Amino acid sequence: MDGESIVDDFRRYFSHTLYRDKLNQSAYYVYTSLSLSLRDRLVERWKSTKYAYNEQDCKRTYYLSLEFLMGRTLGNAMLNLDVEPSISGALTKLGLVLEEIIDQEHDAGLGNGGLGRLAACFLDSCATLQLPVKGYGLRYEYGLFNQKVENGYQVEEPDHWLRNGNPWEIERPEFSVRVKFGGKTEHYMDADGTKRAEWKYTKDIMAVPYDVPVPGYRNGTVNTLRLWKSMATKEFDLSEFNAGSYADAVAAKNAAEHITMVLYPNDVSENGKELRLRQQYFLASASLQDVLRHWMNKHGNDFSGFADKNFFQLNDTHPTCVVPELMRLLIDEHGMDWDAAWNITTRTVAYTNHTLMPEALERWSVSIFGRLLPRLSEIIFMINARFMAQVARRWPGDVERQRRMSIIEEGNEQYIRMAYLAVVASVSVNGVAELHSRLLTQHLFRDFYELWPEKFNNKTNGVTSRRWMVSSNPALSSLITRTLGDGWTTDMAKLKELAPYVDDASFRAEWQEIKQANKARMAELVHRDCGVVFDTNALFDVQVKRIHEYKRQLLNMLHVIHLYDRIKRGDTADWTPRCILIGGKAAPGYVMAKRIIKLVSAVGKVINGDPDTAGLLNLAFLPNYRVSAMEVICAGTDLSEQISTAGKEASGTGNMKFMMNGALTIGTLDGANIEIREEAGDENFFLFGLTTEEVDATRGHYDPGAIIAADEDLRRVMHLLESGHFNLFEPGIFNPIIQSIYSSGDPWLTAADFRSFVNAQQEVAKTYRDKERWTRMSIINTAASGKFSSDRTILDYNRDIWHLPQVAAKTM
Ligand SMILES: *Cc1c(COP(=O)(O)O)cnc(C)c1O
């Protein structure tokens, strides 16, 4: 584990395994070689972790997710193995710079945003807490698209992240499983006179697992993320080959391999494409077969103890095919009767809901579903028939309630409501912040809550301090360690002990100095990727997240335009210079979100190009927002923008990364913002905007025209927009945005929150001018951020839902 021997291995990998030499010093192979030598160190711990779990025959949880937004791995592996300083030293002797090697790694962008990053943080926490948890996902050939900005518009480019190979994955063809699609079911009586079903004439596809190591923080544990790749079966080739068409056989093989080709780039909204359903079933079936095979190795066909030792946590409804597929496998493949299979299913499945937004609620048309997965469709109808009988027993004669609660939505076309299926089968249903979980029981799942109040619970999200503090902000982390000792990394509640240091002037000075250095690092990124110069003495005001109307990047823009307007009319007394950064990807089909990106670019161009704003105001749009960019941004941010319409953001996790790194939040009473404010104290949070209740009360008589007419600042902002000031050469392009603000049906109530947003921003500006006060508030925010560690979240899941033992890997 010493730096010298790791670097020795590194040289062997580089010159022998990868056949590179001094004439061919491609930096990517330097990265690959170092990664392989690190991976070797992980492999030993990986095996001993597996042995420890097997020896104890402990209960396990499988975390199923269509997304794992892992980002980079090398830096994290070095941090968790505690070898970074020695490697860095040994590399220096070879004339190599560790940071440059780290920078070679492509982000593993197998997720859209918060939901996928949550899965990644959870895996980190499970390994650090030594919990036997395995992630199951898909090995997309193409991750989330790379975003370019051309003439201010988003352009998507494919993210072929595996192009140069991936040293962190290990293919496990020996554990491949077969997944069925299509065909039809036949019912028959078996020898014992039992009715049985057989799913026949299917087009099968192989699922090949690739394992990725998930190291715990300096504890010898390495858990597994198993990602499935789709491959053609051998018969597939053969049958076509025998038909005499070699080329068709190859083409058919290609089609089979399409399932895991690309991650769907939609955050929040579902697109309902059949290929997406194939992906979902592929993940569910392959993972369940894998778990059942592992069970049968030890227990044969005896599933009586299965529910005590296995648990499936569903990250949103995307993996909900697990419910009917587990039923199918237990009944059709393992001969169990319905009640026994249902008993196992309902004791081993739990569902995490991630949003209340109607466009995110997955529904699959029964005709598509039935054609692709006929046996699963039958099983879902049987689950629903039994469930409807239960509803009828509880509310006799309440046909309306049966209609409302049915897993099958009736109408011209029938749809399967995946969220209801998940709720009916789950032992636990959770939301991801206090407010969100409460709203779930009051609206979306109200009927279900009345039936099964005990199922519903909250698990406020969290993020891992290892990636989002120690790794992304080494200077701050080292100050905290020098102050508190090093236990805080795995016990974030300890950060509270920082609070008394707000009164220590030299501590505050160090805190400020570190923030300045981090701002310089962020300014470099902004300069490189946006071509805009940020002055580190200005307030760094940041909103990075997916571009979506509910997140209200547009409200942010109205404030920016208002600041620009103030400068133009000479209202700059007591001005606080600001640099505003907005970044994020829009779903490629989301026209309004893409228009908002264009607006940010266009306004930025005018502001940055106007000599009047020099030293007062800058605006940049950061292209290709991703995990590795956030690692730089969260450390350098002063002000975190969390300004969604109340009731729309389930939790948010970006808000937590910023808080840990000492940014102050301007935010609405939405998602985890509420809990952030509770922890930090009202006086250390810039609150604005309507509450959820006020938002609901406003609908129906919302009159943005009147609000605009009554507010001179907003009127002037709208006038600048309407006059085409930011789009002189592209007239009319922002009309749909302008109309949305004026629309009484604007679901995001942008105009309604303008005044209180601007007032809160004025308070921000005033506070920032008082450096010592700002620094105190910053320290208090970090000190109060312990609740938002994903370690706390995972301990909550484990205490209330999973009930896993902590199992230490044997030290070698
Ligand atoms: C944390 C994170 C998110 C989630 O951000 P929100 O502000 O909670 O929407 C999205 N993308 C990336 C790359 C992240 O790191």
Image (cartoon, rainbow, N blue to C red):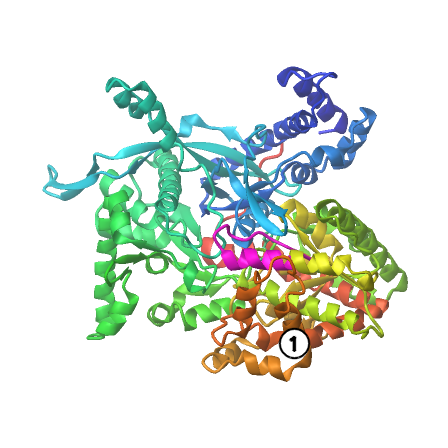
Neighbourhood count class around disc 1 (C-alpha, 10 Å): few under 14, some 14–19, many 20 upward:
many
Q: Mark 1: which amino acid? A: Leu
Q: Which residue range is magenta in the image?
A: 580-600
339 sits to left or right of 650: left
Task: Quickly name the residue at label 1.
Answer: 714
| Residue 686 against residue 48 in the figure, above or below | below
- Residue 245 position in % (x across, y down): 28, 20
Callout 1: helix, strand or loop? helix
Which quadrant contains ligand 1? bottom right
Instruction: Reply yes or no: does residue 582 show up in magenta.
Output: yes
Q: Residue drawn at (65%, 81%), measured in percent from left and top?
A: 711
Q: Residue drawn at (65%, 76%), measured in percent from left and top?
A: 714
Q: Nearer the viewer, residue 509 or 556?
A: 556
- Residue 101 position in % (x across, y down): 72, 32
Examine the image and state in which quarter residue 775 appears.
Answer: bottom right
- Residue 526 position in % (x across, y down): 73, 49
Which quadrant of the rendered structure holds the C terminus?
A: top right
